[in-house]
Image: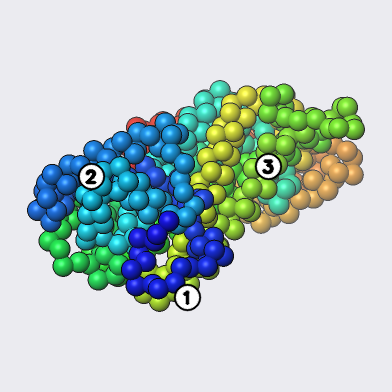
Amino acid sequence: MAKLWGGRFSKATDGLVDDFNSSISFDQRLYAQDIQGSIAHATMLGETGVIPQEDAEKIVAGLEGILADAKAGKIAWREDAEDIHMNVEALLTERIGEAGKRLHTGRSRNDQVALDTHMYLKDCCAEAVQLLEELIRVLLDLAEKHLHTVMPGYTHMQKAQPITLAHHMMAYVQMCLRDRGRFAAAYRSADVMPLGSGALAATTYPLNRERVAELLDFSAITQNSLDGVSDRDYCLEYLSAVSIGMMHLSRFSEELVLWSSNEFGFAVMDDAYSTGSSIMPQKKNPDVAELIRGKTGRVYGDLMGLLTVMKGLPLAYNKDQQEDKEALFDARDTYVKCLTVFTAMLRTTTFRTDVMERGAAGGFTNATDCADYLTVKGVPFRDAHRVVGQLVAHCLDENKALLDLSLEELRAFHPAFDADVYDAMSLKACVERRALPGGPAPSAVTAAIAQAKQALEKPAI
């Protein structure tokens, strides 16, 4: 097949170069965006008189036919046509004749691929927001169900203070809401229309860029032709949002792996989201959570790969930027799969509330409340801290919990202890007294749930 750009060349490119240069194997994914962008471009060319209206109409009709056939799986993209843009243009010319050759008027593949990628990223960001909202709703349902389910909170993987499972779930709601905001921000960065930038210096044709932006539902046009073709910040913003989102899924997955172990016993993964062992018949492995944890590193690689590609590129477009597609496609596919299966897995997970409460009762999670009790009685906090530390050491020697100690034993360490200390150190009291906004008390968590629901009611995009 003759190259559409081959007029200047007297010698065919080597087959190795054709294969090395070709991107159709992966950028064919952009066929819908490429054709829709071309329809808008041709429509504008006809409206402005840059090409005859009759030709514009033929081009639009031809492109609509190609789009329909592509969606129906009737088109085999040609490797020798190099990329999706030249595939579409060549196919169009085959179908409608000379008019098809006018499509590329006032346009370069540089601004064309930028347009396709902007359109694709907008779709990806909207998709991510929708999937995140589904996960947030699952988390909110769990929080409402477990407002009073006491469990241990941890620092340094050591039991620290009692919280509730609802409070724990709401921590991930906050993470997911921030992820939602990041994808909304990435969408805004992608929501500028670069067509009209040309190869780097715009064009002499009187194009109506605003009309193309209107036809393609962009909110603005790019303001510099050099930047319009060379910018990939919006791709990096999307990859960054995906990477942070994967980090959040990975952290939660790590907890579910721990919680489903015999040592913790807090959670039971549904059989449909677990696997077994080929040699150990008793095993029930949290492979889904482990795979999500593992695939997070893969997505980090996509982000770092594109950052590295872009770091040394002079203005304007360079062929290096072809490397953005596979990173974007891989990150999008990985994130969508992980987010979808994680949501389904979490929805079917059973939480063993009795084991969680027993876990909170051990490990002296009420020690801080014991110190706070003394402080309320007038003991300086540093002195109270030391006294309770001595009590904990005593309990370890006696194999007791703080609530197991008699009032006489407590008073042996400080006379300020009184009978009301037992109510003050109960797990229920420890949680319910922490009613500040953002705290684990059921009243505070209920308010946080209401705020999260209000946030979901406002469209992110």
- Residue 320 lies, in percent from the top left, at 47, 67
Residue at image point 29% right, 70% down: 200
Would residue 42 be found to the left or right of residue 347 on screen?
left
Q: Say whether residue 370 is visible.
A: no
**Label 2 element class:** helix
Q: Say whether residue 252 is visible.
A: yes
**Label 3 element class:** helix
| CA distance separating discs 3 and 1 | 34 Å
According to the picture, the residue beneath numbered tag 2 turns out to be: 59
Residue at image point 52% right, 28% down: 138
Give the residue type that dot 2 points to.
Ile
- Residue 236 lies, in percent from the top left, at 45, 59
Give the residue type that dot 1 points to.
Gly
- Residue 19 lies, in percent from the top left, at 54, 60
Give the residue type that dot 3 points to.
Leu
Of the residues tagged 2 and 3, which is closer to the observer? 2
Sequence order check, earlier mark of 2 and 3: 2
**Label 1 element class:** loop
| CA distance separating discs 1 and 2 | 39 Å
| CA distance separating discs 2 and 3 | 47 Å
Where residue 312 is drawn, which disc sits there? 1
The residue closer to the viewer here, 7 or 102, is 7
**Quadrant hosting residue 195:** bottom left
**Quadrant hosting residue 257:** top right
The residue closer to the viewer here, 35 or 292, is 35
According to the picture, the residue beneath numbered tag 3 turns out to be: 291
